Image (cartoon, rainbow, N blue to C red):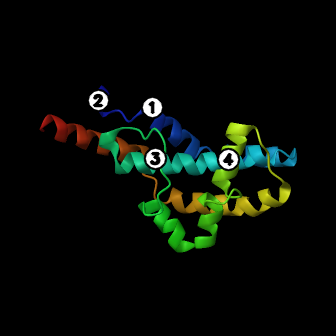
Amino acid sequence: MAHSKIDDRCQRALNIFSDRSVVLRADKLSLNKEYGLALLLHFARIESSLKILRYWDRMKDGWPPSLLYNANWRPLKDLKARNGPAYASLIGASGKSLRAIRNAVAHEASTSDVDTYRALVPVALWAFEILATQVPSRQALQAKKIRLRNVVIGN
């Protein structure tokens, strides 16, 4: 049965996805004026959701090493169709998008200001809420992994 186990990185992403304390930790960081780190936590939830969805879509390829933010991919296309400006604030090309700020915080030890934080948190919560309705359960992921395994070995 070891071959039917979902990827460990997916397990970790599911833990981040389901960890309700992430928002509370982000709120505490914002109270200490660590707006960039708080936004990083919000983006981590979104990125975990997207990686789980990519794994679901392409499970036979294994865990995605990185994400390509292609607006034609179903989850992103859905977000963009629901609210184009919010989508642009989330992962748009602008240096002020949540994704750009996440990259700056993670790779350049940058931070963010309170106005940007206040503008992006509702976008992050909106995106997560929509993505959360699409993320399969641990059990569904396990069942799909078993089905794929059975197809590969010819059962």
CB of mark 2 within 8 Å of CB of mark 4? no
Which of 68 and 37 lies nearest the eye of the viewer? 68
Mark 2 or 4 closer to N-term? 2
Q: Which amino acid lies under the numbered mark 4 shown in the image of this protein? A: Arg
The residue located at (30%, 45%) in the rendering is 144
What is the secondary structure assignment of the residue under circle 3? helix
Left or right of 22? Residue 132 is left
**Residue position for label 1:** 8
What is the secondary structure assignment of the residue under circle 1? helix
Task: Judge whether 152 appears above or below 24 on screen.
Answer: above
Q: Which residue is the extreme one toward the top?
A: 2
Question: Is residue 125 among what the camera can see?
Answer: no
Mark 1 or 3 closer to N-term? 1
Mark 4 or 1 closer to N-term? 1
Q: Residues within 10 Å of mark 3 (few under 14, many from 20)?
A: many
* Quadrant for the N terminus in the image: top left
* Quadrant for the C terminus in the image: top left
Question: How far is the residue under mark 4 from the one under mark 3?
Answer: 19 Å
Q: Which amino acid lies under the numbered mark 3 shown in the image of this protein? A: Ile
What is the secondary structure assignment of the residue under circle 4? helix
Task: Judge whether 61 appears above or below 72 on screen.
Answer: above
**Can you give x and y, in whole percent of width and height, for residue 57 in the image?**
36, 51
Q: Residues within 10 Å of mark 1 (few under 14, many from 20)?
A: few
**Residue position for label 4:** 102
Question: How far is the residue under mark 4 from the one under mark 1?
Answer: 24 Å
